[in-house]
Amino acid sequence: MQRCRVNPETTFPPYTLPKGLVWGVWCRSWWHGYSSFSPNAGFKSKFNLYLMHLKSYCFLLFILVLTHLATAQQRFFNLGDFKLENGQVIKNCRLGYRTVGTLNPNHSNAVLVPTWFTGTSQQKLSMAAPGQVADSTRFFTIVVDALGNGVSSSPSNSKAQPNGQFPTFSIRDMVRAEHELVTRHLGLPHLYAVAGISMGGMQSLEWLFSYPGLMNKVVSIVGTPNQSAYDRFLWGTQLAVLERGKYSTDAMKTVGALHEMHLTSPSYYYAKLPTEQEFRQHVQAKEAEYVKNNNPYNWASQLRAMLGHDVFRGRDREEALRSTQAKVLVVVALQDHMVNPLSAIQLARDLNAELLELTGNCGHLANGCETDKIREKAKTFMALQAE
């Protein structure tokens, strides 16, 4: 009789599943299937029983992976007094991050995931789930909290520079701090990839031009290399509402409604909120949600960073394009009313990069509505050489 075997070279994430648990789940599912077969039983019925056991244990494994992802430890890197590109200084600056997965022996499978606008590393651990872009069963995934998100140094948590006294930072400053985390704190001279969604995609593209030789691949999902006039109208209006409203609760409510309106598309809301009552209930619930979950000073600080975002700022465009070394995957949503897709499409053409266009009416939330398309594209794009 064959014995249950596990590849001795298989590694398991230190912050996902205990090694014995993974082995046990897999071996048990295999053993149920193997032991189900009998010369006296019909092959078809026993094979179906085997598949049923395998599916149930795979589902269990998936749930366990998600559970452990959610408990990946929050860590911090202290940068000290961090000088920004505008000359201002964030005092006692620190950067939050979480890691999940196992770094391989030659340190060639590290993937950095920057957070989206106002997002946290805890929320973005979803990108490290099995089958996702930064799948932690294949990669050592580093999810980093961007400056101003309320976890890393931000207006809301700075004792030396609280609220309106907090310095004005840029997307490029975010990336430079993340570079310090990767190279100086984690000791990694190279990354396999940098991948992000929305503002995370903006940071990913800044990585591409600020540190062109430091990663093999870059993935930008509904991000942009620079802001269009439409984007500036949206972000600038939100910032003006907060500033003129003196960061009040009412100002945050208005900003939340504006933000919610642009997250999807007119046709999406036409179908989702067909009556005035449903619309009013939705707006009231969202306004309360935005006020509860967001600090207006943090929101404004990241708005300013996005408004100033341009990967070609201070660089010759053609020279910058020639300097890139990483392979690039650009994912855009054609009905995106939050981050205009045209600049990203043009960049993909200029770089001869892979381009995936999402066509549904979920707009900026297309990465959630058309997940299967992204996963299928990312599966081949992110494949390690050994795979």
Image: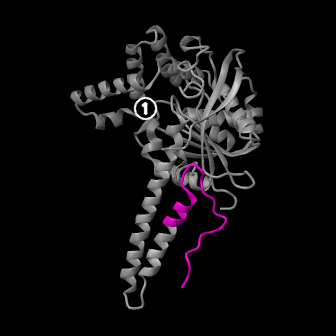
Q: Where is residue 165 in the image (x, y as percent from the top left)?
A: 59, 11
Task: Return the residue found at the far bottom.
Answer: 40
**Vertically, is 37 above or below 120?**
below
User: 10 Å neighbourhood of mark 1: few (<14), some, or many (≥20)?
Assistant: some
* Percent x, y of residue 142: 62, 42
Is residue 313 in sight in this rendering?
no
**Image quarter of the C terminus:** bottom right
Residue occupied by mark 1: 263
Q: Give the range drawn in magenta.
A: 1-25
User: Residue 23 lies in magenta, yes or no?
Assistant: yes
| Residue at image point 37% right, 27% down | 289
Query: Along the line of sight, which residue is nearer the eye, 78 or 360?
Result: 78
Left or right: where does residue 254 sit relative to residue 350? left
Q: Position of residue 230 (x, y in %)?
A: 51, 24
Give above or below for 334 relative to 304.
below
In this rendering, position of residue 382 left or right of residue 58: right
Picture quadrant where residue 283 is located: top left
Q: Which secondary structure is most common in the magenta stretch? A: loop
Q: Can residue 360 be seen in this view?
A: yes
Nearer to us in this view, 308 or 161: 161
